[in-house]
Image (cartoon, helix red, strand yellow):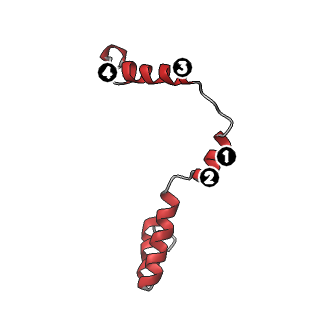
Amino acid sequence: MANMTLEQEILEIVQRMTPEQQRRALEYARSLSRPRGISGKEFIARTRDISISPDDLEIMKQTIEEDCERIDSDEWEFPS
């Protein structure tokens, strides 16, 4: 086993598992690759005190509509 790659060793172990163990291992592997975040409840608790005025929201909306929905190719730098 000393010369095996990680993938080879994992595959060898998984091949010896029962189908149920393989399913659980797959679920675990998938959980490792998911981005970690916070729950909606925690997000609400953290952001409860943030207040944005209707005027500021309108400015944000206009800026997004005007600036973010167009491509300005002059601002792009391409490697030579």
Q: Please tell me which of labels 2 and 3 falls first in the chain.
A: 2
Judging depth in this view, the residue of 51 and 16 nearest the camera is 51
Q: Secondary structure at mark 2?
A: helix
Q: CA distance from mark 1 to mark 2?
A: 6 Å
Q: Please tell me which of labels 3 and 1 falls first in the chain.
A: 1
Residue 13: x and y, percent? 47, 78
| Residue that mark 4 sits on | 71
Q: Secondary structure at mark 3?
A: helix
Q: Residue at x 42, y 70 (%)?
A: 8
Q: CA distance from mark 2 to mark 3?
A: 27 Å
Looking at the rendered structure, the kind of residue marked 2 is Lys
Q: Please tell me which of labels 4 and 3 falls first in the chain.
A: 3
| Residue that mark 1 sits on | 45
- Residue 41: mark: 2
Q: CA distance from mark 1 to mark 4?
A: 37 Å
Front tag of 2 and 3? 3
The image quarter containing residue 67 is top left
Q: Residue furthest front?
A: 54
Q: Secondary structure at mark 4?
A: loop
Looking at the rendered structure, the kind of residue marked 1 is Ala
Residue 31: x and y, percent? 51, 63
Q: Are marks 1 and 2 in contact (CB under 8 Å)?
A: yes
Looking at the rendered structure, the kind of residue marked 3 is Asp
Above or below — where is 47 with respect to 80?
Answer: below
How many labels, in total?
4
Q: Residues within 10 Å of mark 4 (few under 14, many from 20)?
A: few
Q: CA distance from mark 2 to mark 4?
A: 36 Å
Judging depth in this view, the residue of 30 and 46 nearest the camera is 46
| Residue that mark 3 sits on | 55
